[in-house]
Amino acid sequence: MSQKPDEASASDSGARPVPRTQQAIVQLRYGAVRDVLALAEAVPVRAPGPQEVQIHVRAASLNPIDWQTIEGNRRLIARRCFPFTPLFDLAGVVTEVGHGVTSFRTGDRVHADNEVHGGGASQYANIPARLLAHVPAELDFAESAALPLAAQTAMTCLDRGRVAAGTRVAVIGASGGVGHFVVQLARAAGAHVVGVASARNHEFVRSMGADEAIDRHETDLSASFGADSFDVVIDCVGGREQWTRAQHVLRPGGRFVTIARDEDGVVTPASAARLLSTITARRLRGAGPRGRKYVPVFLKASGDLQRRVNALAETGQLRAHLSRTFPLTLEGVHAAVEESRAGRTVGKLVLLR
Ligand SMILES: NC(=O)c1ccc[n+]([C@@H]2O[C@H](COP(=O)([O-])OP(=O)(O)OC[C@H]3O[C@@H](n4cnc5c(N)ncnc54)[C@H](OP(=O)(O)O)[C@@H]3O)[C@@H](O)[C@H]2O)c1
């Protein structure tokens, strides 16, 4: 069960000393998740560096990037040292702060997208203070672990799409981790929102705030809507066809914001070069006031961005939908990865200690 603030344990409040070693789920090399993760005993608990905060991890969430990076898809751009403790998103209680940190104290409930440092699969993790935010009072650890990476990405999409009151927005992949946050944020901004998702998820997408939903198995944006129907298309799925179709429905000067690539799989020098030339070509094509703008988003996580997300969570305008919760164990991580890989996640997958 998740815990509310007043249920923090004795070790969380600093009454019990932090152990010198811990159990952690570690990645030993790149490869299939079932082959390369192991439970390690007696992993040293490091004291936080001057700008770091040590937290007792209570919950983590799983994002596709977790298994993509474990498999080594991104080793060209983000090489890991092994053993490595995976899971970017985490929430927990501060157990120690570095001497240069002034904004967090022992016992605070915090959460972060700890990016390439990972650590969600350990008992204790050190997080750069610039990535951390306090958890909103009403959220438990499971809900707060579900927010960072996906909700910060969604917020960045809204920013880059310049979504405001009255903007007509289409969200491709509206039921997924990032997509369900994009729908809620666009709704909160006062936009008119169309969600693209499987029919079985239309009720959910509407409950997140979409005004309309279309079935991705039956139709697509260019078949369902005419020219100039949208100011912004936000793509949370990827594939060349999303950009091709979006150009038919975006108004002149409209923006296609995407968080995913045309190609799945391992980033190689050749695929990285193709990506760069694709981005350049699409940007050139969109140049000028009437061109449709191609806007790729690569999240730069921060505590500041998380605080903007949290302000909306505090007013009830944003919530994480927890699709399934798993134990924060080796088997739990395996099961969550299998679920994520199946590509049918509605909202977020969470792991809870
Ligand atoms: N650039 C960045 O900074 C950044 C940040 C976060 C995530 N990402 C990437 O963005 C993508 C989405 O992340 P996420 O966390 O939202 O994933 P997710 O939660 O796993 O998304 C699952 C949803 O995607 C939909 N879907 C799956 N396959 C699809 C397809 N072929 N066509 C259309 N929809 C499909 C399904 O919805 P329906 O069944 O309802 O259609 C499913 O419920 C991932 O590739 C991730 O790596 C990038």
Image (spheres, rainbow, N blue to C red):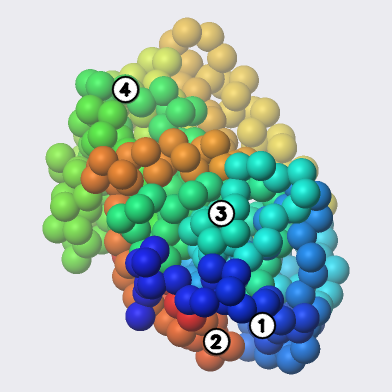
Neighbour tally class for label 4: few under 14, some 14-19, many 20 plus, Cα within 10 Å: some
- Residue labelled with disc 2: 329
What numbered label is drawn on residue 112?
A: 3
Residue at the image point whose x is 62% and y is 20% from the top: 284
| Three-letter amino acid code of the residue under disc 3 | Ala
| Residue 149: x %, y % from top left | 52, 53
| Three-letter amino acid code of the residue under disc 4 | Ala
Label 3: state its secondary structure.
Answer: strand
Distance between the Cα atoms at labels 2 and 1?
Answer: 8 Å
Query: Is residue 223 shown above or below 344?
Result: above
Numbered circles on residues, count: 4
Residue at the image point whose x is 25% and y is 21% from the top: 165
Which residue occupies the extreme right position in the image? 81
- Residue labelled with disc 4: 164
Left or right, 190 with reference to 329 = left
Left or right, 68 with reference to 78 = left
Q: Nearer the viewer, mark 4 or mark 1?
A: 1
The residue closer to the viewer here, 123 or 301, is 123
| Three-letter amino acid code of the residue under disc 1 | Ile
What numbered label is drawn on residue 165?
A: none
Distance between the Cα atoms at labels 4 and 3?
Answer: 26 Å
- Does residue 5 appear in the picture of this structure? yes
Distance between the Cα atoms at labels 4 and 1?
Answer: 42 Å
